[in-house]
């Protein structure tokens, strides 16, 4: 069969529909990843208090949350299989991350046993569960980074940053619980708490830039709830205590309840974001299928009516007809009376649409790439200087402020110039 422009247009539209259907499958996958993160956050919080209180608190609550985690894990494993059964659903890196997450999930039964036997301390348990959550978050990031539709990509960027902020909120709950359960302020926990509060602000700022009006309104409503005032009060108590000072351990229930209420409200927003993502995919599929139907009608019209431009051949040797216009592929008024004009208009409209999509997609990917750069630069500073994550970020931020540059530009410079951090731990130094 001879290749034709309408055939290519139809193929392009069909490929767009297929891609949108794959995006819908990946959106459901992201929803399950987010659900797994949510239940592990709850289990982590209960486990930290259970261990820190030597089993006096949250024993029944922890068992209930483990059962919930296991149920969601079963659904996630089935979704993993669905992704493997549909190779076009994601790049190779996505499968590598899936394997890493599965490895973490398979370690959970042993970890839970160690928690029950008190053969692991609260800090180590929180770290182990957080490592699994980090892998789940990385999978969401990978799906967002590989999305080809700009509108969907923006939604995924908003969702990823919201999930990231929610995870930082969950970590804050766990760290604060460790301090209160012990009834004693430790500087390392206090510094971690401050870093998590700051990290949340960054994540939710990016979320707000990419989210829709409805999601931003939901988020703003959370900021006006009573538990936020109580959390801020407890944050001040935790942040202002001197290293080694006693803290009222009876505040742990209020802290955990307030943070949990905030996380539950955030979970509802996360569910709304996933539902909105799926709805958006379905709308785009319906629109593309209507376009496909119209294109088929256009093809029938082309087959029934030869293009009027074929008459230009009769003027090939007409001296009154400019040679530069003969055979030119130019949309104009003289082509408007035949079906061929619709094909030309469609080509032009599709070209303009693709250009707009590329610009929007670039904006979404730029946000993800900037986050990657900052995370890599933090890792470099941590490795070269032997400092904690929050200290690495403060160094990047302070350098950006001192030089009046964006933090991502400073991060990029640090990665491009390894001597930015000298081996002796002084900024700007180098070794011969």
Image (cartoon, rainbow, N blue to C red):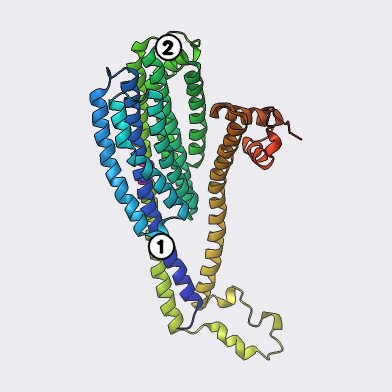
- Viewer-proximal residue among 128 and 176: 128
Give coordinates of residue 375: x percent, y percent.
Answer: 55, 38
Quadrant containing the C terminus in the rendered view: top right
In this view, 361 is above or below 122: below
- The question of residue 272 being in magenta is answered with yes
Q: Badge 2, how many Cα within 10 Å: few under 14, some, many 20+?
A: some
As helix, strand or loop, the secondary structure at mark 2 comes to loop
> Is 325 displayed left or right of 162 in the figure?
right
Total numbered circles: 2
Q: Which of 331 and 114 is in front in this view?
A: 114
Number of residues whose C-alpha sits closer than 10 Å to that of mark 1, classed few (under 14), some (14–19) or many (20 or more): many
Name the residue furthest right.
432
What is the C-alpha distance between the residues marked 1 and 2? 58 Å
Q: Looking at the figure, which quarter contains the N terminus?
A: bottom left
For this rendering, which residue is in front, 424 or 415?
A: 424
Q: Position of residue 379 (x, y in %)?
A: 57, 36
Q: Which of 150 and 61 is in front in this view?
A: 61
Q: Give the range drawn in magenta.
A: 271-276
Q: Is the magenta stretch mostly helix, strand or loop?
A: helix
Residue at the spot x=36%, y=11% of the render?
Answer: 249
- Identify the residue at image location x=48%, y=73%: 8
| Kind of element beneath mark 1 | helix
Picture layout, residue 236 above or below residue 40: above
Instruction: Identify the residue position indicated by label 2 in the image.
Output: 184
Q: Residue 199's x, y, as percent?
A: 51, 30
Image location of residue 197, percent across then percent down: 48, 25
Q: Residue 17 carries which label?
A: 1
Mark number displayed over residue 125: none
Q: Do the residues labelled 1 and 2 touch (CB within 8 Å)?
A: no
Q: Residue at x 48, y 30 (%)?
A: 200
The residue at 37%/40% (across/down) is: 104
């Amino acid at each position: 069969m001879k290749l034709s422009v309408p055939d290519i247009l139809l193929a392009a539209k069909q490929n767009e529909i297929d891609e949108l259907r794959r995006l819908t499958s990946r959106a459901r996958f992201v929803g399950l990843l987010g659900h797994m993160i949510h239940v592990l956050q709850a289990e982590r919080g209960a486990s930290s208090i259970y261990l820190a209180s030597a089993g006096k608190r949250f024993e029944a609550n922890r068992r209930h949350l483990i059962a919930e985690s296991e149920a969601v894990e079963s659904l996630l494993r089935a979704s993993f299989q669905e992704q493997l059964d549909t190779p076009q659903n994601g790049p190779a890196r996505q499968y590598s991350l899936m394997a890493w997450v599965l490895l973490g999930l398979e370690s959970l039964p042993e970890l839970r046993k160690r928690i029950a036997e008190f053969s692991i301390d609260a800090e180590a348990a929180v770290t182990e569960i957080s490592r699994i959550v980090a892998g789940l978050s990385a999978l969401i990031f990978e799906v967002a980074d590989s999305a080809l539709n700009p509108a969907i990509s923006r939604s995924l960027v908003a969702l990823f940053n919201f999930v990231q902020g929610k995870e930082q909120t969950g970590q804050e709950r766990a760290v604060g619980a460790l301090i209160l359960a012990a009834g004693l302020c430790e500087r390392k926990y206090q510094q971690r708490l401050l870093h998590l509060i700051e990290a949340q602000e960054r994540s939710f700022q990016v979320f707000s830039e990419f989210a829709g009006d409805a999601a931003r309104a939901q988020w703003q409503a959370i900021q006006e709830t009573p538990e936020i005032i109580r959390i801020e009060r407890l944050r001040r108590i935790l942040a202002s205590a001197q290293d080694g000072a006693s803290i009222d351990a009876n505040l742990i229930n209020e802290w955990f309840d307030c943070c949990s209420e905030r996380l539950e409200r955030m979970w509802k927003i996360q569910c709304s974001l996933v539902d909105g993502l799926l709805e958006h995919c379905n709308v785009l599929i319906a629109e593309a299928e209507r376009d496909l139907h119209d294109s088929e009608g256009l093809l029938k019209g082309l087959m029934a009516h030869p293009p009027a431009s074929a008459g230009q051949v009769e003027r090939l040797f007409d001296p009154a007809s400019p040679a530069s216009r003969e055979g030119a592929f130019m949309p104009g008024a003289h082509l408007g009376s035949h079906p061929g004009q619709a094909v030309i208009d469609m080509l032009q409209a599709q070209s303009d649409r693709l250009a707009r999509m590329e610009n929007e997609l670039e904006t979404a990917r730029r946000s993800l790439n900037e986050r990657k750069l900052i995370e890599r630069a933090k890792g470099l500073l941590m490795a070269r200087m032997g400092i904690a994550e929050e200290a690495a970020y403060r160094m990047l931020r302070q350098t950006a402020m001192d030089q009046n540059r964006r933090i991502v530009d400073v991060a990029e410079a640090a990665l491009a110039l390894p001597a930015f951090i000298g081996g002796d731990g002084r900024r700007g130094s180098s070794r011969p």
